Each structure stands twice: as structure tokens, then as C-alpha cells.
Amino acid sequence: MIFHITQTHTPDDCPIDSGGSSTLYNADAEGVTLKAMYGAFSEHVIFYIVEADSFKAVNQFLIPGFKSCTCTVTPVAEEPIV
């Protein structure tokens, strides 16, 4: 399943001086493939498109940012509604 994730942090929790945005997700989370990552960095918002086997896998992907970010996770599809 494909998920669109919007991850937001405050300026006080910005990881710019502590490893950058890649510290906010687990690239090695089992069952998750990161398809795309985009940032509205001046707004402290990161968008991910991931393919995942389960919602549990999505949570494992997001665990590094749990103490500093909030997320909206939306399942999405390429298939049109007919």
C-alpha cells in the first residue's frame, strides 16, 4: 500500500543542527520503501511517499521523529475511482 505522510516539527525541534531531516525517519524500517521525500523546509514540514506492507511498518519508519514531530498518514492510490 502507498502512503502520503506529512511530518511537521516546530522551529525549536528542527534537526538542522543535529543531523538534518534524515534523522526524523528510519530508512531501514522493515517493510517500507521510501519512494519520494520533499520538504517545505522553511515551514518545517516534510512530505514522504512510502510503500509499506502494513501500518505497523509505517510507524517503525516514523519512530525517530516521534518525540519532535507530528504526522498525518494517508493511504493513497494511483487507481482512479470508476
Image (tube, rainbow, N blue to C red):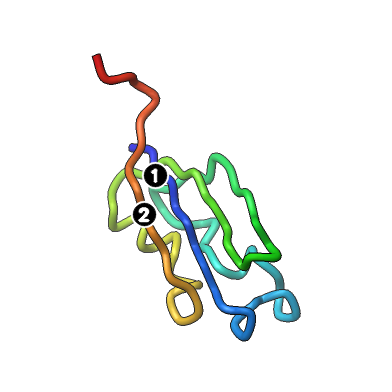
Residue 1 versus residue 28 in the image, above or below: above
Residue at (42, 40) in percent of width and height: 51
Q: Position of residue 26 (x, y in %)?
A: 51, 62
Residue 75 versus residue 59 in the image, above or below: above
Q: Which is more toward the observer, 53 or 72?
A: 72
* 10 Å crowding of disc 1: few (<14), some (14-19), many (20+): many
Is residue 17 toward the left or the right of residue 60 in the image?
right
| Residue underneath mark 1 | 3
Image marks 2 and 1: residues in contact by CB distance under 8 Å: yes
Indicate which disc, 2 or 1, sits on the residue closer to the N terminus: 1
Q: Which amino acid does label 1 sit on?
A: Phe
**Quadrant housing the N terminus:** top left
| Residue underneath mark 2 | 73
Is residue 53 toward the left or the right of residue 9 in the image?
left
Residue located farthest toward the top when viewing the structure as drawn: 82
Q: Where is residue 27 in the image (x, y as percent from the top left)?
A: 55, 56
Occupied quadrant, residue 62:
bottom left
Residue at (43, 75) in percent of width and height: 66
Residue located farthest toward the bottom when viewing the structure as drawn: 12
Q: Which is more toward the observer, 61 or 8?
A: 8
Residue 39 versus residue 43 in the image, above or below: above
